[in-house]
Image (spheres, rainbow, N blue to C red):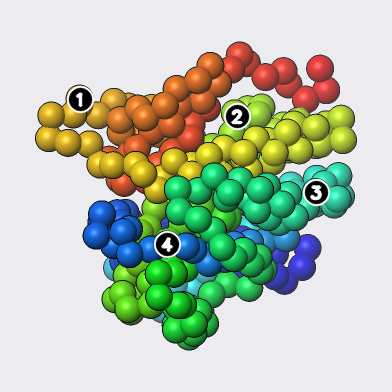
Amino acid sequence: MSLLRSTVLVLLTLVIGGCAMPMRVSLTPEQRAKITELKARVVVVQDEVIVAVQPSNVGAATGGGLIGAMIDSSITNSRVKASQEVMGPFYARIEDVDYRKEFNEAIRRELANYPIKVAQFTTTPRALSQDSLAQLRGELLPGQALLVIYPRYYLTMDFRNLDVEATVSMWTKDGPANVPVQRGILYYQSQPVGAGGKESIALWGDQGAAAFRGAIKDSIVETINLVLMDMDLKAPGDNAAPSQSYAFNAGAQQAQIKGRLVKETATRKTVLGDDKKLYSLPVIAGTVASAGQ
């Protein structure tokens, strides 16, 4: 496994938790009235699926310090190595899967349905730095805004689900330096496959990785649906129904997402979480057969 893949595995443990920027920012009617067209920039950095790895927190539990940090590093690196070993044969089966190409082609088509006209579309594998973002904003003409879509995709820590987290933000030329005028975090989780670990990887890779390829396609369709939905999604009012709990695989454990149902089909539920993220969650299907059956 390449050093880049190993590094991304570790970095993913640091970025899943989010950042100090507001989780959700809604475009005001006044701001929207000033925008006549968008320049869209789709950033897909990854060229292959990775695995979420739980970082060690021994250091924090023991009061921190150099010794704690060294222990954390050793434990996290051990977990990354174990994930590499499990994933090794699977990568050979999905070598021809090109998420970036499929996502870019699909969203290029579907952005024709975005609530604001998309006049220009650019795809790139390069993450945006603050300097490059400032440059792109500086090039905007009157009435234009910059739409940035940045998806990440990975298998959960237990290998059972394919997850996609996409950040969608909109920037104007004269807006605040570090806060977009519109921002949403969109989260897709696939149907679970297997009981976890090597069994799940075997099932993902079975029959030419049919389950994985299907989940990739479904994730792209659903993520783009969330992108289109998010623009006009309003926060619930004071008289909204109480939040409900929805099943969610956090990798290390089964968890619950608290939120309000936005849309429901036979296979998926779209939920606006109390954490301000918009989720596409699976309606859990029947038990998946074990590998080899």
**10 Å crowding of disc 1: few (<14), some (14-19), many (20+):** few
The residue that label 1 is drawn on is: 241
Question: Considering only order in the chain, which callout, 2 or 3, is on the residue closer to the N terminus?
Answer: 3
| Helix, strand or loop for disc 4 | loop
Q: Is residue 266 left or right of residue 48?
A: left
- Three-letter amino acid code at the position of disc 2: Pro
Residue at left offset 46%, top offset 77%: 140
| Helix, strand or loop for disc 1 | loop
Q: Is residue 120 left or right of residue 115?
A: right
The residue that label 3 is drawn on is: 97
- Three-letter amino acid code at the position of disc 4: Thr
Q: Position of residue 95 (x, y in %)?
A: 85, 52
- Three-letter amino acid code at the position of disc 1: Ala
- Three-letter amino acid code at the position of disc 3: Val
Question: Considering only order in the chain, which callout, 4 or 1, is on the residue closer to the N terminus?
Answer: 4
Q: Is the residue 128 above or below the residue 95 in the image?
A: below
Q: Is the residue 265 above or below the residue 62 in the image?
A: above
